[in-house]
Image (tube, grey):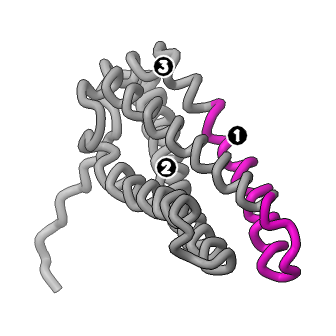
Amino acid sequence: MSDTPRAAAKPVFLYTEEQRARRDSSIWTTIQGVLAPLQFLVFLVSLALVLRYLVTGAGYDAATISILTKTVFLLTIMVTGAIWEKVVFGQYLFAAAFFWEDVFSFLVIALHLAYVWALWTGALSPDEEMWLALAAYAAYIINAGQFLWKLRVARLQASETTLTDEAPA
């Protein structure tokens, strides 16, 4: 063990003051705030329909429509999210603060589009399609968790900044 004191860890912030101001004033922040829970709701309904099909063999058409609806929501939130990143960070994707979330988002999109491709081409059986959809949904849950974590970090950052701003000099 070393006797030298360790340097205090410097907090890592997601947003500069200017970026936070752009984030807070952007309509794209509101759009993301509306689309994200809607997409999650669509996901939950679709997950239930996919599991119902896999367990009972009934409801293939409903499950398929729900997966396609989830894919449309995913693509919409990805496009609007890229616009949001451009407004806030000055680049459409892979801003440092959200780099790994964006990387994983492309895996989620690839799995959803692989499902659409399989459906379109008939390359997989209905059961295999549903398992592919479940793989896409598992990746989506991980990605949603990444974004929820960043939301928490941003809120903690805002609280810390508020406390620092209010502290006597």
Q: Closer to the observer: label 2 or label 1?
A: 1
- Is residue 7 shown above or below 124? above
Local packing at callout 2 (Cα closer than 10 Å; few below 14, some 14-19, many 20+) is some
CB atoms of marks 2 and 1 within 8 Å: no
Q: Give how far across and how far down residue 107 sits, in percent.
A: 40, 61
Local packing at callout 3 (Cα closer than 10 Å; few below 14, some 14-19, many 20+) is few
Q: CA distance from mark 1 to mark 3?
A: 21 Å
Q: Earlier in the sequence, mark 2 or mark 1?
A: 1
- At label 3, the amino acid type is Asp
Point out which mark residue 24 bears. 3
Point out which mark residue 147 bears. 2
Q: Closer to the observer: label 1 or label 3?
A: 1
Which structural element holds mark 2? helix
Q: Give how far across and how far down residue 83 sits, in percent.
A: 38, 26
Q: Nearer the viewer, residue 66 or 150?
A: 66
Q: CA distance from mark 3 to mark 2?
A: 17 Å
To which quarter of the image does residue 20 belong?
top left
Apparent side of residue 157 relative to residue 134 in the rendered image (left or right): left
Which structural element holds mark 1? helix
Queried whether the magenta region covers residue 21, the answer comes back as: no
